Amino acid sequence: MRRIAISDIHGCAVELDQLLKKTNAQPEEVIFIGDYVDSGPDSIEVLDKVAEWCREGATALLGNHDDLFLQWLDEKENILYYGGRNGGMATINSCLLRLGMEKVAISQLLSDVFKENQIRKIIQDRFHAHISFLQSLPLYKRESELIYVHAGINPRHGLEKTTKLELLHLRDEFIHGYNQPETVIFGHTRTRNIHNQDSVYFGSNRVIGIDGGCAFGGQLNALIIDNGEFRTTSVVKNELYHS
């Protein structure tokens, strides 16, 4: 069966819809490799789409930004780190706009803990299905000689002994140090930071990076696996939508 891997959508709902249509994707073919929220314009719309496709047979994995959103909701991460440094305000405001509420600035939450807690409670109450969906997601998927994971695998310990933190956050240690026989398809690290291009990165050590940095002016990539052959297609950032 054909497989279509997509990663690091980061709220780019329009581009996701375009890419799914461009690949003529069927739900059972698709595996989403994490980071549905933060930075881009419509995290909730992306979660709606991914959850809908999963109900129809697609697979979705957890990304570090999805986990960070959950950590903030559980009061285990502060708003400066989540909202200010990791694009979380885009997700918070996506929730508020869906409810017909006004957007908030991070300065408002930094100066008013009560307001932050109020907004957190609203999101917990009104987006319970989205939160439960993220909480249900696995960290990796293995299919024959392919492994799908958000960030990477500890090259010294192997998949089974790689921690959750590593599966969600590894970068160079994995990308350049991996040496196992399975091919690993990953997101998390922008391909521009690996080979100076937003296109899919094919490493000589059987690692394939697909994060094209759509929310940051790049593109949303799809890696298509069909009968053991790899090909790619992409949708560039929609300037009109993001302006």
Image: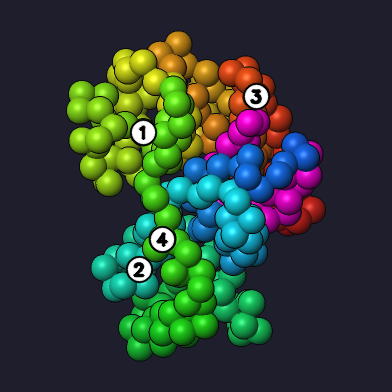
Tell me how far mark 2 sits from mark 1, CA to CA.
Answer: 23 Å
Which residue is at the front of the view, 218 or 188?
188
Q: Amino acid at mark 3?
A: Asp
Residue reaching furthest top? 204
Which residue is at the front of the view, 14 or 198?
14
Say above or below: 229 vs 149. Answer: above
Say above or below: 63 vs 80. Answer: above
In the picture of the structure, the residue carrying the numbered disc 3 is 226
Q: Amino acid at mark 1?
A: Gly
Q: Amino acid at mark 4?
A: Ser
Q: Earlier in the sequence, mark 4 or mark 1?
A: 4
Tell me how far mark 3 sits from mark 4, CA to CA.
Answer: 28 Å
The label nearer to you, 4 versus 1, is 4
Q: Residue at x 36, y 15 (%)?
A: 181
Q: Amino acid at mark 2?
A: Trp
> Mark 1 Cα within 10 Å, few/some/many (few <14, many 20+)?
many
Q: Earlier in the sequence, mark 2 or mark 4?
A: 2
Q: Quadrant of the C terminus?
A: bottom right
- Evaluate if marks 2 and 1 touch, with contact meaning CB atoms under 8 Å apart: no
Q: How many circles with numbers are drawn on the protein?
A: 4
Tell me how far mark 1 sits from mark 3, CA to CA.
Answer: 23 Å
Q: Earlier in the sequence, mark 2 or mark 1?
A: 2
Tell me how far mark 4 sits from mark 1, CA to CA.
Answer: 20 Å
Q: Determine which of the numbered discs, if any, sits on residue 152 in the image.
A: 1
Q: Determine which of the numbered discs, if any, sits on residue 72 in the image.
A: 2
The label nearer to you, 2 versus 3, is 3
> Mark 3 Cα within 10 Å, few/some/many (few <14, many 20+)?
few
SS for tag 1? loop
Q: Earlier in the sequence, mark 3 or mark 4?
A: 4
